Image: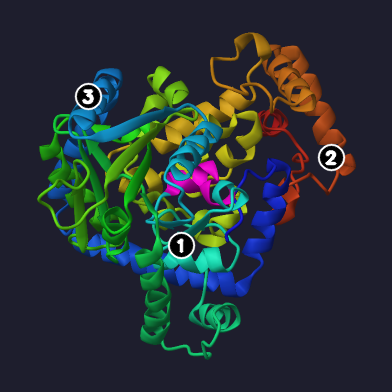
Amino acid sequence: MSQPMHYQPTTGFAERARAAAGDPALRRGFRGAMDFLQAKRLAQFPDAGDLSALRDLGAAIRRHALENLPQLLEQLEAKLVANGVQVHWAETPAQANAIVLAIAHRIDAKRMVKGKSMVSEEVGLNHAMEAAGIEAMETDMGEYIVQLAGEGPSHIIMPAIHKTRQQIAELFAAKLPGVAYTENVDELIKIGREVLRRKFAAADIGLSGVNFAAADSGTLCLVENEGNGRMCTTVPRAHIAITGIEKVIARLDHVPLLNTLLPRSATGQAVETYQNFISGPRKADELDGPDEVHLILLDNGRSQAHADLQLRATLQCIRCGACMNHCPVYARIGGHAYGTTYPGPIGAIISPHLLGIGATAALATASTLCGACNEVCPVRIPITEILIRLRNEAQARPAAAGPLRGAGEARSALVSAIFRAWAAVYSHPALYRLVTWAMSRGRVLTPRAQGAWTGIRTPLIPAKKRLRDLLAQRRRQ
């Protein structure tokens, strides 16, 4: 059973990032994987004009949904209920887990199979089920691998991207009875499938995520490549879907456009292998499907992001992972260094709403602001602008702090004093001349160790002569 990916203190982020960056095998693996994914995505969008138009449409669809979020959620609920789906609302992870447990206890469920769901990772669902004596088995191959290893996903699309073939072979041989060591990829996949097939047949509950929820028809849309999502949503007698409130869209006919962007941005595929459309439980004349379908709509800080017009763009995300695949920071340290469910650029801007700005302040600074994430985001989220906003919010004065949870908690008295002194020096010409004169004459006293700066750079040492002195010398000559 995998351990829940609870938040790890940001005081440890630098250490985790340093350890990851110092692991040659990890860096080599991530670099190769990111180069491969970047090339595949590029090949799927050969026409820059077409790509730009698609991104404009995708962004417009997501913005429209967010602008009308309350009404669309109500419409979605009404349509789903009319279709026979039971809708549940959860404000916190604890409430979401309690809803799942209540359903499981009512039907006396002992076993759950899970399709890929980052929201279930977000709420720590596996841990909650295990504590209640209910087996929760991941069936996405990547998720199954990290669960077997007792880890969390390191990427929102490819959970086990940090694992090598040799590591997976060792894991299967050590954890699965009767399995011999093999590095043959096809054999490893076959081994995993044989284990999971038995789990599908014995499961009482199938749990899935949701890629898009169409409000006009009450349809839950799930995309996948392995078929495990279809098994989870049709074989067990109860299907529970869990998603964030931002996944709603206005119309079912918006799905094709978004599905044009999602797989091509994520894995460089022209189309997903499976597209599942769920609108209700099995009807009397149908041969398969669950007896009951539930949808859990989770807030967990999303309404806070929605309330701010700039930060609302965070919720446009369609979870493709393209920002991670192109991020120079993520490509060097991987997902686990971030210590949060959602790593990389998108994680840096969504995690503050889930966990508080003070608790995630280090993530907003884990960026070069190069803009690669902005350039590839299929729905045009201005990630770098939001990162700058969150940096400011983390350092905000208490009186100026906005409505964001934890704003100002990362404010440092020392840093604040330094910037006040800097502002005073630059606001008074006479003081500026005095300070720069003293710095140039006392340059030998400059410390060679200057915190994180000199960890990878040469020390900042004032020049022997100020520009003012050099110009005066030139005039005298």
Mark 3 burial class by Cα count in 10 Å: few <14, some 14-19, many 20+: some
Q: Is residue 137 above or below residue 191?
A: above
* Residue drawn at 46 percent across, 45 percent down: 104
Disc 1 marks which residue?
Answer: 143
* Whole-number angstrom distance, CA of label 1 to CA of label 2: 56 Å
Whole-percent x, y for residue 389 in the image: 50, 26
Quarter of image, res 361: top right
The answer to the question of whether label 3 and label 2 lie on touching residues, with beta carbons closer than 8 A, is: no
Q: Which residues are magenta?
A: 118-127
Locate the C terminus by quadrant.
Answer: top right
The answer to the question of whether label 1 and label 2 lie on touching residues, with beta carbons closer than 8 A, is: no
Asked if residue 270 can be seen in this view, the reply is: yes
* Whole-number angstrom distance, CA of label 3 to CA of label 2: 71 Å
Question: Image check: 60 left or right of 425?
Answer: left
Say what amino acid the circle numbered 2 marks: Arg
Q: Please name the predominant secondary structure of the magenta segment in the image.
A: helix
Q: Is residue 165 above or below residue 437?
A: below
Disc 2 marks which residue?
Answer: 443
Say what amino acid the circle numbered 1 marks: Glu
Q: Is residue 423 above or below residue 120?
A: above
